[in-house]
Image: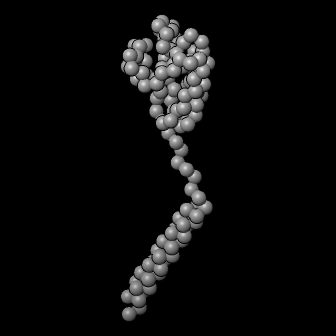
């Protein structure tokens, strides 16, 4: 059920997950520990009943319950955090690109005219 919820949602860097629970704990673990439902040295551990976890990087995060038997009964979840999108270009950057394109077109036109004139000159002399 948790992985279905996670796959139905899109997560990005700096999103937060809020866990509310009693008599339990939240662990962030490696993929191997997730599959085994056990971690002696979790990446993150909290058992205060209300946990806010920030997804600080793109990639996969593996969460399990720290109470014996809970993970095996499905209290585990994988969250995929998407790569950040490239920032949109500013108007100045777009203007610079347009200026460069116009300059290249002007150079190309001048070069073409020069070549045509040279060719025409050869024909008439």
Expressed as whole percent of the image width and height from the top left, the position of residue 67 reads: 49, 10
Q: Taking 93 as reference, is 13 above or below it?
A: above
Q: Where is 9 relative to 24, above or below?
A: below
114 up-or-down from 51: above or below: below
Residue 105 visible? The answer is no
**Looking at this view, is 57 or 7 the one in front?**
57
Return the x and y of residue 102 as percentages of the image width and height. 54, 71
Residue in the foreground of this view, choosing between 48 and 37:
48
Figure colour scheme: one colour
Determine whether, in the image, residue 67 is placed left or right of residue 15: left
Q: Residue at x 41, y 89 (%)?
A: 121
Q: Is residue 75 visible?
A: yes
Quadrant in the picture for the N terminus: top right
32 displayed left or right of 107 = left
Q: Is residue 91 left or right of residue 69?
A: right
Q: Residue at left 38%, top 88%?
A: 122
Residue 104's spot in the image, x, y percent? 48, 71
Judging depth in this view, the residue of 116 and 33 nearest the camera is: 33
Q: At x 39% / y 20%, what residue is drawn?
A: 41
* Image position of 33 (left or right of 7): left
- Residue 9 appears in which quarter of the rendering? top right
Tell me residue 27's x, y (percent): 48, 20
């Amino acid at each position: 059920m948790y992985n279905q919820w996670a796959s139905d949602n899109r997560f990005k860097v700096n999103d937060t997950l809020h866990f509310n629970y009693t008599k339990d704990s939240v662990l962030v673990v490696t993929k191997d520990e997730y599959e085994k439902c056990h971690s002696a040295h979790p990446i993150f551990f909290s058992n205060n009943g209300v946990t806010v976890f920030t997804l600080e990087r793109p990639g996969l995060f593996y969460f399990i319950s720290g109470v014996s038997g809970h993970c095996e009964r499905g209290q585990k979840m994988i969250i995929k955090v998407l790569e950040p999108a490239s920032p949109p270009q500013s108007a100045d950057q777009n203007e610079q690109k347009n200026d460069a394109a116009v300059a290249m077109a002007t150079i190309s036109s001048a070069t073409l005219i020069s070549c045509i004139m040279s060719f025409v000159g050869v024909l008439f002399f």
